[in-house]
Structures are given as structure tokens and as C-alpha cells.
Amino acid sequence: MTITEPTTEGTKTEGPLELESGREALAERPLGVLTRPQGGRGWRDWLSTVDHKKIGIMYGVSAMVFFVVGGIEALLIRLQLAVPNGGVLSADVYNQVFTMHGVTMVFLFIMPLAAAFANYLIPLQIGARDVAFPRLNALSYWIWLSGAIFLNSSWIVGGGGADCGWFCYSPNSGVTFSPSHGVDFYAIGLLIAGIASLVSAINLIVTCLNMRAPGMDLFRMPVMTWMLLITQFLLLFALPVITVALFLLMFDRLFDASFFNPDMGADPLLWQHLFWIFGHPEVYIIILPAFGVVSEVIPTFSRKPIFGYTFMVFSGIAIGFMGWGVWAHHMFVSGIGPISVAAFSLSTMFIAVPTGVKVLNWLATMWGGQIRFTTAMLFAVGTVAMFTIGGLSGVTHALAPADTQQTDTYYIVAHFHYVIFGGGVLGLMGGLYYWWPKIFGYMLNERRGKVNFWLMLIGFNLTFGPMHILGLQGMSRRIDTYSSGFGFEFWNMVATIGSFIIAVSVLVLFHNIWKSKREAADLPPPGPDPWDARSLEWMIPSPVPEHNFDEVPTVDGLDEWWHRKYSFDDNGKVVQIATAEEAAQDGSAKGVHLPAPSFWPLVLAVGLPLIGYGLIFNLWLCVPGGLLVGMGIFAWALEPVDDPDATHDHHHDDDDDDHDDDGPDDAELATAAAAPGDSNAPGDQQGGE
Amino acid sequence: MTTETSAPATSDTDTPDAAPATPAAAAPATPGDSTAPATPGDSNAPGEDTAAAPATPGDSNAPGDSNHGPSTGISNTKLAMWLFLGSECLLFGGLISTYLLYKTRRGPDNLAIPTDVFDIPFTSISSFVLLMSSLTMVLALAAITRGDNHGARVWLLATSMLGGVFIGGQVYEFTSFLREGVGFTNNPASSAFYALTGFHGVHVSLGIVMLMSLFVASWQGKLRQEHSETVEVVGLYWHFVDVVWIFIFTVIYLVPA
């Protein structure tokens, strides 16, 4: 890829170069309402971007905001429980706080943080320029955000948060026992967020399957991409089930249907089944991205390829399949009958096998490697250790008799925090440290990073370790307080102290981000490949240029990037054949045509919460909401995918000069108007759901 | 679509069409525009346009040419629709399960349930109408594939009208149920009935909106032979909705309580 002289930049504002007259009108004002965004700088750029990297960053930032929100809720819980007869929160508010803590952490923190990695990394790891449907990608983010804000707005306009626990069992979720609007916000907010996840899942699966660079066979994809792909499949099939459940709950509460009300002869177990058919795959939706991060970090810092790549992939697939057959282990005490209990008990024990395969493969990857304990590596190893503890306590739940004792005690709380926090959160934190230089172009300070890690690890174990003991002592979850004399005092105090240590560690993370950014001015830039890593995203500059790859690489095998830097000599020794700087692309390509930004995903997303408020408060509000959604869809459809004016200077590579002049425009048009059509298809029906 | 092969085909025609369309945006032109050009190319939105010829990942629809096509050989759009339909299976699976669980539950007041009042011959006829719409959908696709735009319009219109007849039948059925005392809030059985058939009705209605968009696009001359994949993708959705109805009809009307 030779680059001709990089002279005129910013031609996009200078007029319609090779465009025929009349063409800009097309790009400028698709509906005469909002000017076609030109993808400049500043906030408008972020509102209208369809760049998968920017969308990934927005997912990440929003997720961290909700991490703080959910974290504050967690601290309130721990303050309330620090001493017997705590008076920080009333029983009612306590119910709302623990419910919203769970909902926020699961749906508004971990899932979007995983989505941030998925958005940012999947196209880079498979050698693509963007996802398959860039505007749908923006739509996913904005819909998710509108759902998240809608859900939390119930604190202000809904008379408090949902108070039925994150799995919201009926009849607690009914109007009788939860008369405020909190549960309505829960149902509709999660429906909206679910639309976002479904659109995103379809988009990312198509990206993984269809957009791979030449030579990037499925079994050459990095494990991270594989785990994210499996996650998207789980989302694809799990979300419709919770969608049904939430719709029925909404019908029950807002339109007096009788799906879950036992007084009307309905069966409350229906909710439990629907919820957990979604809810158990959800557990893997949370943990698999973290497994992916660990599978990237450990090989890099052990300087070895991942041990048993095929096994890693297939064990992930096995987890994905078996995750569908274990949901009723959440319901052992609900009276589902001995045969069901036995079957689900067995399947639950079996699902530990592929997880064990993964743990052993990570250990085998480290075995004999040249291990560097960077912060990312510490987080990855911490993930493996903590998740293993959580996995082992999970096996104890698989034994139905033991589970009968443990159900609804703090032992369960301890278990799922070990897998979700110890597995999911620690893993994704490692991912932050690992990919930070790639995403933002500067390194996070390692010393502060290690302080962050150790504080988080210690605080985490102090918080949730004692909960095993509390649970076995009989302390039930979700009680707003306890009397002295049961022996709960000491360990509760320890847990509360631990939770504040976690809070400090998160502050250290934020401090590290801020301080490292300031220090970065005096440090050399990290270069394309600061960790001597293995996958394709490290062969392009940091931060990643807007067009990702100057030239889409041709892939010859697993760990393609590593093999571009290293080879074997005659004795089988690894020898360096190129430095990262030599082998990397320099990001200087010009004239790479990218999908143009659009405001319509945002407009469409704003309509959905309006419909939600309308359903709860006044059906007339649904009208403007519906109009916004409809307008968004139609305007979207009208708007060409590609703005002929944008980023379209004339420095193409030699090889595509021939159709440079007429090709792009026509192609743009064709593809442009096209995308809307199909994209509606999925979008439409979700609107309808 | 960046390639030479496809460019000449679409470019000449597209340009004049599309440019005028925009000012008219707010007007009726909209639906048509949206779906019309939704050709094979659409899916590739991101990729194709990247001018970098050698290995644009996105260039899905151009399998044969220098750019490598979608890795699976199925265009992005069609693949996305298949995935979406897979997801829909679980949506209807959940609703059908709910109905099966509740179909005889009359609630504490022992109110009427849908199976007390339904009219099997009537619904059989409207089901037949819906199934016939799959045939006309196939004929529409066949017509546009061979370049018969007039035929495509006829069959698209026929399909959406058959769908409209089905929806009309459902509206009639719902109102007659209501008159006979089977309300949504009666008991679990009636709630489940209305939820299941209602969700299906909404799906059919959205399908009609898509078909009519295609019809308008074709009317305006924007839906041509090279866009046949758009019709195919909408057709996939339409056939799915029909197939789901076979299950729903069987479960509600044919399987004895």
C-alpha cells in the first residue's frame, strides 16, 4: 500500500469534488430537520458517530458511570448491614436499593462493559473496518442508554426503584405487593435495553461471520472474539425469552392481565421458568467476555500461544449450549419435582467440566512461560483464581440437598459475587488495563494499577468471602437488618470494610486514568504493540485510526500478528524477524471511505422511553414517542449510508484508482439507501415488541 | 458494490432516482425509498464503501469479483434476518408455552375462556388466506427475479392484501370474543390467548408495512431486478410469520383441551 503525497486534507468541507451538482443536497438534509452530520469534532461527532470504536468507548464510559451508581447502592447496603439493627435505610428503601443494585450492575454495568469490548475489538481482531451494520450499532448504544436512563428515572418520577429483587419473582412483582411504579420501570426499562442487546447481537454475529479478513478462518479468530461471538448467540436466544416475561409482567401490572397473579389462578412458577431460561445463559453472557480477556492476556504475558486453542473454543461453545440446560437449579426449592431436580442437578455438575477445561488450559498456558506480572496479567490470574472459588461453590449448589439449605442465604450471594465480580469484573478490569493503550494511546501507570489490583482483590475477598460463613450460619439474603446475638456481627462488619476497600480501589482506577493521561505527555507514546501481543489489533497504531487498517491484512494462521514478528530458526528457537514498528501499519492511509455518521439512531432511541412513560402514565405520551420512532426509521431509510462529501480525499492506493472516480459514489448510493431497508427489518419488529 | 461490475449497473439508474427523492423526503416517498434500494448491497454498509480495493471485508454481495465477499457467502442482510428469525422462534416459543400452560385456567370466577367461544371454521378460512399469502410472496420474488416489475407489484399487493384479510379476520374474531364475554383480563387463559395471537397479529401487520413499502418503491421504479434480495429478505420474514401461525393455530384451535 503505497501512499501518494498526503496533501489536501479536509476536502470534505471544501465542496463537492467529484460530485455532480445537486448531489450534496442529498447528503445535507435528508428530512429537512437535522443537517447531515459531517463527522467533525466535538459533541456532535459523538452524538452522530457510527464508528464502532467511538461507540465502544461510549459504551465503556456509560458502563463506568453506572458502575459508580450501582457501587453507591452497594455501599448503602453494606452500611445498612454493618451493625445489627442498622438504621441507614428503611426496609422499603432497602428493598429498592438492593434490587436496583443488582439490575444496575448486571444490565447497566457488566453487559455494556462487555459490549464496549465487543464493539471495539471484534472488527479489529478479525481485520474488518467496521461492524456489518454501523448505524444499527449506534442504534444499539443509544437504545441501551435510553433504557438505562429510563430505568433509573424511576427513582425520580416512579415513586422509587423496583423493589422485587433483580429476578423480580411474582407475586412480589404484582401491583398488590409492589404498588409504586418501580416494577413498571423495571419491566419497560429492561425491554428497551433488551432491544439494544438484540440488535447488537445480530449485528456482531453477522460481523464475525461475514466480515473476516482474507484467511481469517473461524478457527483463526482470537479466543476473545470467539467468546464474544458465543456471548452474542446467547443474547440472541436468551433475550426473546425475558422479553416475553417482561411483556407479560407489564400486561399484568398496567393492563390487568393475569399471567402471574396466583389469585387469578395463574402460576407464579411461570415467571421463574421464563426468567431463569434467560437468567442462566445471562450468567454466561456475563462471564464469557471475561474469559475472552483472560485468554488474550495470559498468552501475551506468558509469551506462549494459548494452550489448546481448539479446546478453549469448543469448551466455550459447550458452555454456551449447556448453559441452556441448567436453569432450574435456581429453582430447586420451588417444588419442581424430584425428577427435574435430579436432571438439573446432573446437568449443573456437567457444566463445570468445560469451565474446568478452560481453567486448566489457562494454567497450562502459563506453565513454563516467561511470565510478566503486569497489572493486566494480575487481573487475569486473579480472575482465574476467584472464578475457580466461585465455580466450586457453584458445584455445591448443584447438590440439591445442600442447595436447599443454601437457597436465599448469603452463601448464594457470596457465590454469585465470586463468579460475577471475581470472574466478570476482574476479568474486564484486566481488559481495561490491557487494551487501554490501544484505545486511548497512552499507558495506564503500572504501579498505580497494581495498587488498584491488590486493593480490589483484597477488598473483594473481605466483602464476599465472609458471606459464605454468614450464609452457612443462616443469615438470609434480602433482609434489611438483623438482631444482635446471631453471631452475624463480626463478619458483616468485615464485609462492610471490604466493600469500602473496593470503593477505594475504583477511585484508584479513576485516579490512575486521570494521572496517567497527564503524565503521558512526557512519556514516549506506547507504539502499536506495547505488550508484544499476538492478535491483529496490535498491528495498527495506538490509538486506532478511524479507518482501522490501512490495508486489510491477509491472515495465514492463528496469532497472525505474532508470526509477523517472530519465526523459528533451524533449531526451533524463536527468533525475531521484525520489530513491532517495522511490521505494523502506520495508519497513514488516505481516502478510505467510511460509513457516514447519522443522527437518526439517536432520534429513534429517544422515542422508546417516551413510549415507556406513556404506557405507565398516560397513553397519549406514546403518540410523540411512536412518531419519533417512526420518523427515525423513515429518515434513516432515506438517508444514504454514505455521505458523498465525507472523508473522501483523493489519496487512494494505486490499485483502486481505476474505479476511484465513479465507483464510490454509485456504490455509496446503492449501499446507502440500501442499508436502511434491511436494517429496519430487525429494528421494526423490535419496535413492535 | 465498489467494484466495476456492479457499479455500471446501478449507478446510471440510481443517481437520477435518488437525488430527487430526498427533497420529497417527508412525503410519501419515504417508505419506498427506505426499502427500495435495500438491495443486496445494503448489508455491507460499512465495508463496501471503503475504497481500499484489495480486501474490503464488507463487500458481501460481490462474491465473484476481486473483493472477497461475505465470509459465509450469505449477504449480511439475509444473515441478519435469519438470525433475527431464530431469535423470534424463542419469543413465540415463550408465548406458546404460556398459552399451553394456561389454556384451561378459568380463574376464580370461572369466566369464559377463548375455547368456549371460538369459531374453528372461520379461523380455518382466515388461516388458509394467510397461508396462501406465502404463495403470492413466492410469486412476487419469482417475478422480480426475472425482471417482471409489474408482476412483482401485483403479487406484492396481493400478499399484503391477503395479510390484511387475515388481520381483518383477527380483529373481527377479537371483537366477537369480547362481545361474548371473553375479555383480556378474564383469566389466565384469555390473557394468554390475546397475548399470543396479538403478538402474531402485530408481526403480520409489520410485515404488511414492509410489503407495502416494497410496493411503493416498485411503483416509483426503485425496486428492480437487481434488488430482488430485498424482496427475498422480506419474504423470509413473511414466511416465518406464516409458519408460526401454523403452530399457533394448531395449538389453540386444533389440539383438544
Image (cartoon, rainbow, N blue to C red):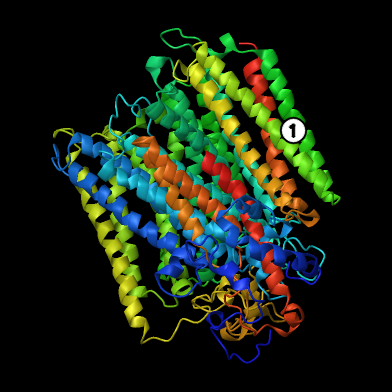
Q: Chain of mark 1?
A: B
Q: Is residue B193 left or right of residue B86?
A: left
Horizontal and vertical percent position of residue A585: 60, 81
Residue A227 visible to an observer of this rendering: no
Q: Is residue A150 visible?
A: yes
Residue A209 x/y as whole percent: 67, 56
The spot of residue A653 in percent (x, y) is 69, 83
Residue B148, above or below B122: below
- Front-lying residue, A452 or A393: A452
As drawn, the residue found furthest toward the right would be B146
Q: How many marks?
A: 1
Which residue is pictured at 68% across the width and 55% down the height? B38
Q: Which quadrant of the figure has residue B94?
A: top right
Where is A540 relative to A52, above or below?
below
Q: Quadrant of residue A46?
A: bottom left
Q: Is residue A365 left or right of residue B217?
A: left
The residue drawn where x is 38% and y is 74% is A444
The extreme top residue here reads B110
Q: Nearer the viewer, residue A273 or B165?
A: B165
Residue at image mark 1: B133
In the rendered view, tell whether residue B99 sits above or below residue A455. above
Q: Position of residue A369 (x, y in %)?
A: 54, 69
Residue drawn at x 51%, y 13% as measured from the top left: B179
Identity, as a three-letter code, of the amino acid under mark 1: Ser
